[in-house]
Image (cartoon, grey):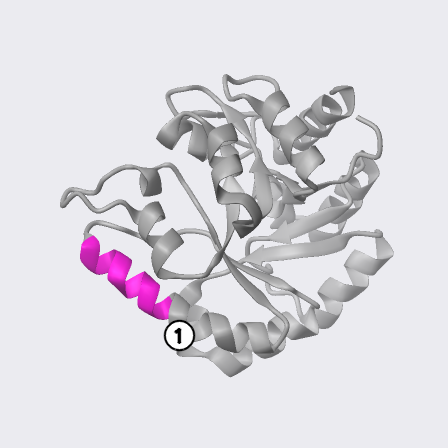
Amino acid sequence: MKNLSAGIQLYSVRDSMKNDFEGTLKALSELGYTSVEFAGFYGRTATQINELLDKYDLKLSGTHSPIDDLVNNFEETLAFHKAIGNKYYIIPHYAFSSQKDIDELVKKINAVSGKLEKEGITLAFHNHSAEFKPLSDGAVVYEQLLYRTDIKLELDTYWAFIGMKDPIALLERLGDRVIFTHIKDGTAEGFGKPLGMGEAPVAQVVSMVKKAGIPMVVESETCDPSGLSEAKICIDYLKKL
């Protein structure tokens, strides 16, 4: 793939991040990743994070961070994310069991998204598969997020494949609501694999998002035998497309 520009979700390399934070960032840069998406900060300060990203020529694409940090401690949370230059605050997960939980999240999103936007930070939501399927009371999470909020979307294309089988059609439908795509692979039963080793339509997704100019964030979750080994398999696969 010419002019490859791919980020990686650092949850993919959580096994090495906790033991060698700097060494992991260095290794990812050497593999050819151009940006990173944080999932926790491993006790590092904003200054430490900025220095290491600069040292290894990595951009910060965004963070996976809890919505409740904004709801309960907005000013402190905002200050940290501004200090690291984060422009995309992405809700990674929310526990849904009924319409009440959807209502709760919608209220939280609508309470903080405008405040964040005024500070130059966009709020987004990262999906798993369950958001596409009816809950026990029939409510469908993803549909309600689309029409009850203006939140931007980080579409995890593998979990969309598991949840509704056609991530290509979903990308077409969502249009400019999608600001990032998680490029991921795995079996049809929901077990993750490095890129090119599963059953998801990864090549088609990559072709589409490249044409649309949607940034790609690689995620490979199983750390088998290690996160960095999977990170290498993934970027080597992308380079061959």
In the picture, measured across the screen, residue 137 lies left or right of residue 190, that is left
Residue 196 magenta-highlighted = no
Task: Name the one closer to the observer, 107 or 176.
Answer: 176
Hey, which quadrant is residue 4 in on the image?
Answer: top right
Task: Name the one closer to the observer, 137 or 218.
Answer: 137
Hey, which quadrant is residue 224 in on the image?
Answer: top right
In the picture, measured across the screen, residue 199 lies left or right of residue 20, that is left
**Residue at 34% in and 60% down:** 148
Name the spot of residue 208 as percent of width and height, x first: 64, 30
192 relative to 18, above or below: above
Q: Which secondary structure lies at badge 1? A: helix
Q: Is residue 230 visible?
A: no
In the picture, measured across the screen, residue 190 lies left or right of residue 216, that is left
Start and end of the magenta stretch? Answer: 99-108
Q: Is residue 240 visible?
A: yes
Magenta stretch prevailing secondary structure:
helix
Residue under label 1, please give it.
Answer: 111
**Residue at 25% in and 62% down:** 103
88 relative to 185, above or below: below
Name the spot of residue 33 as percent of width and height, x first: 76, 40
Q: Residue furthest toward the left? A: 137
Name the spot of residue 56 as percent of width and height, x first: 84, 51
Q: Quadrant of the C terminus?
A: top right
